[in-house]
């Protein structure tokens, strides 16, 4: 069984030394660089735009994993497409035509992913799984870093894994929010392939030890 992939979230990085922190997680062996894009409407927070993400892309030696928490998904996909991230995730709760947007993302040479808020059941993406490369499960309420892990995501991940095994076994499951060395083993057992960790990685005394502890 492959090791858990780790995608540190730059939301918890020191934005005064962003290039330094991005370089640090890449040197420490992360698999992806997770970039949270918030518009202040879909979630009550405003984060970064394409200029900052372009700087992250230049500093990173690992692929970008862009998570859109926005109202106008298509507009933002177009803004970030030129940076060629590995994944772009958009929220099913905000997209009227998810299949169309999935096709658009793939046509740009980017792997499409759908994100689900904590209350959103995995069944809502069942008939989209054949066209997805990843599903992102939020294990906190989106908008802010440093929140506590919502344990019900474990059962949700297991149910999603069952759907994936039937529909598209190549589709990955990613979990974002409150991940640490204590719950990562349970996440692995539930079928999760990728974990996003912000505070746990960047606030740790050793970034490399934090990332290594999540590779179960």
Image (cartoon, helix red, strand yellow):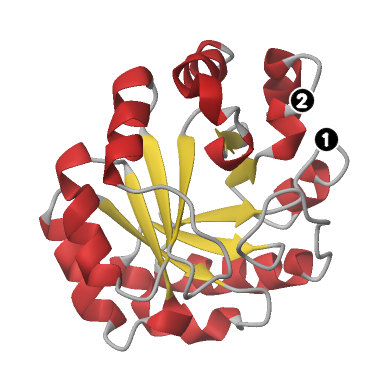
List the single residue furthest toward the top. Answer: 27
Seen in the image, is 40 located left or right of residue 208?
A: left
Q: Residue furthest left?
A: 107
* Residue denoted by label 2: 213
Residue 92 lies, in percent from the top left, at: 43, 78
Q: Is residue 202 left or right of residue 111?
A: right
**Which dot marks residue 79?**
none
The Cα–Cα distance between marks 2 and 1, rounded to whole angstroms, is 6 Å
- x and y percent of residue 115 in the render? 49, 67
Residue at position x 23%, y 49% from top? Answer: 80
Of the image marks 2 and 1, the number of the one nearer the N terminus:
1
Residue under numbered circle 1: 181
Label 1: which secondary element: loop
Please state if 86 lies on the left or on the right of 162 as rendered: left
Q: Nearer the viewer, residue 112 or 162?
A: 112
CB contact under 8 Å: marks 2 and 1: yes
120 w.r.t. 151: above or below: below
Q: Secondary structure at mark 2?
A: helix
Towards the viewer: 11 or 83: 11
């Amino acid at each position: 069984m492959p090791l858990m992939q780790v995608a540190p979230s730059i939301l918890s990085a020191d934005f005064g030394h962003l290039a330094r922190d991005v370089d640090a997680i890449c040197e420490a062996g992360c698999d992806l660089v997770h970039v949270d894009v918030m518009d202040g409407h879909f979630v009550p927070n405003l984060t970064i735009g394409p200029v900052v993400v372009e700087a992250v892309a230049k500093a990173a030696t690992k692929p970008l994993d862009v998570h859109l928490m926005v109202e106008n998904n298509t507009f933002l996909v177009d803004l970030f497409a030129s940076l060629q991230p590995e994944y772009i995730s958009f929220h099913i709760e905000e997209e009227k035509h998810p299949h169309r947007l999935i096709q658009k993302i793939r046509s740009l040479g980017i792997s499409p992913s759908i994100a689900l808020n904590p209350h959103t059941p995995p069944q809502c993406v069942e008939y989209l799984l054949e066209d997805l490369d990843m599903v992102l499960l939020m294990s906190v309420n989106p908008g802010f870093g440093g929140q506590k892990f919502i344990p019900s995501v474990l059962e949700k991940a297991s149910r999603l894994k069952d759907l994936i095994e039937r529909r598209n076994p190549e589709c990955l499951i990613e979990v974002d929010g409150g991940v640490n060395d204590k719950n990562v083993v349970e996440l692995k057992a539930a079928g999760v392939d990728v974990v996003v960790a912000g505070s746990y990685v960047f606030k740790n005394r050793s970034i490399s030890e934090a990332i290594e502890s999540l590779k179960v």
